[in-house]
Amino acid sequence: MRIPILAAIVLMFFIPSASYSQLVPPERVEPVGPPLFVVTVKGQTGFMDPAGHLVIKPAFERALPFHDGLAAVQRQGQWGFIDTTGRMVIEPQFISVGSFSEGLAKFQVKRYPDKLGYIDKTGQVVIQPQFDVAEDFRNGVARVGVATYKGILLSLIADVGVECHYKFIDRNGNRVPEPPPEHYATGEQDELIPFRKQGLYGYVNAEGQVVIEPQFEYAAAFSEGLARAYKNRLCGYIDKRGEWAITPRFEYANDFSEGLAGVKLGEEGWGFIDRSGQAVVPGRYGWIYDGFRHGVAEVALDRKQGYINKKGDWIRPQGE
């Protein structure tokens, strides 16, 4: 009984609200729907189109990208959601949220500051706050976790990630078996889905048949016919035969999008390569957040965060 009692005391006096389940910002979500991009002008956040025109006036403290037709925005420390016209469809009332995925979004409220649940697109609670980790829904299933006492103590003492007991739930919050890799198939022709076996990654098809044997330290989903894969801690890109299209030589890399992929080009910094592996945008950025969408990519350089076009030119919000 000593560990539970000690953990309870630590939790009562030393853990600040939302200490180990922060959701803002969540893992970045690819924009879906209208090509609107989060932009900050004079300390206020709004949305611009690919040409830099301000479509939704900067009037928020923070914002997340649009997903499922809605974007999370913050006012007076509280989060709500707007549609693509800028109309507030879910009033600010949450201390933390995630973007919508399959009609559900993660949230936290003051009443349960350390727990996550899910709301629908009307703002109604669908799954009550009860999780310490909550991932996005994919094909009707989401992975969630509840922290262990041991995990909480270790995170406080050693500053490590919180150990959790994980399970999978459906859209009603009911526990379901862990889905096989093919569950996440999207219906794309000749689709391959990454899976992990004995510490190595390979790929199966939509029927669950192994197409590329496990051999990579990590392997991502295919994008535009190529997939990121790691060998000897370096990243390259493979084709659907499992052969190297671009040999591993990058410390970090992103997926291909609109024919280009962001990669870390050694000491030079982040830049973009084409499908042959040639650098087309020099490696001068401190970070590249996503691939190109509608000819626009989000990057950071010398503490400046913004958007560039495929020539590497900055897109300055008009009206800034």
Image (tube, rainbow, N blue to C red):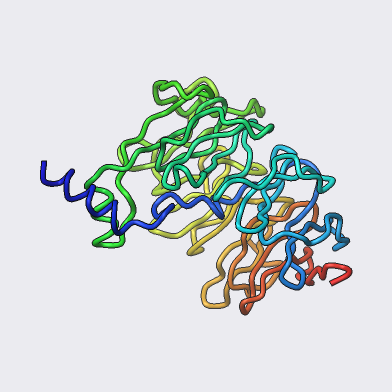
The residue drawn where x is 51% and y is 24% is 183
Front position in the image: 92 or 285: 92
Q: Residue furthest left?
A: 2
The residue drawn where x is 44% and y is 25% is 180
**Percent x, y for residue 293?**
75, 52
The residue drawn where x is 66% and y is 52% is 64
299 sits to left or right of 39: left
**Percent x, y for residue 141?**
51, 27
**What is the number of callouts on the image?**
0
Q: Is residue 10 visible?
A: yes
Asked if residue 206 is positioned above or below residue 18 in the image, the reply reads: above
Front position in the image: 190 or 294: 294
Q: Is residue 275 visible?
A: no
124 sits to left or right of 155: right
Residue 305 found in image quarter: bottom right
52 sits to left or right of 175: right
**Percent x, y for residue 168?**
42, 28
Q: Residue furthest bottom?
A: 302
Residue 133 found in image quarter: top left
Front position in the image: 208 or 76: 76
The residue drawn where x is 28% and y is 59% is 156
**On the rendered image, what quadrant is the C terminus found in?**
bottom right
Asked if residue 180 is positioned above or below residue 57 in the image, the reply reads: above
**On the rendered image, what quadrant is the N terminus found in?**
top left
**Percent x, y for residue 316?**
82, 70
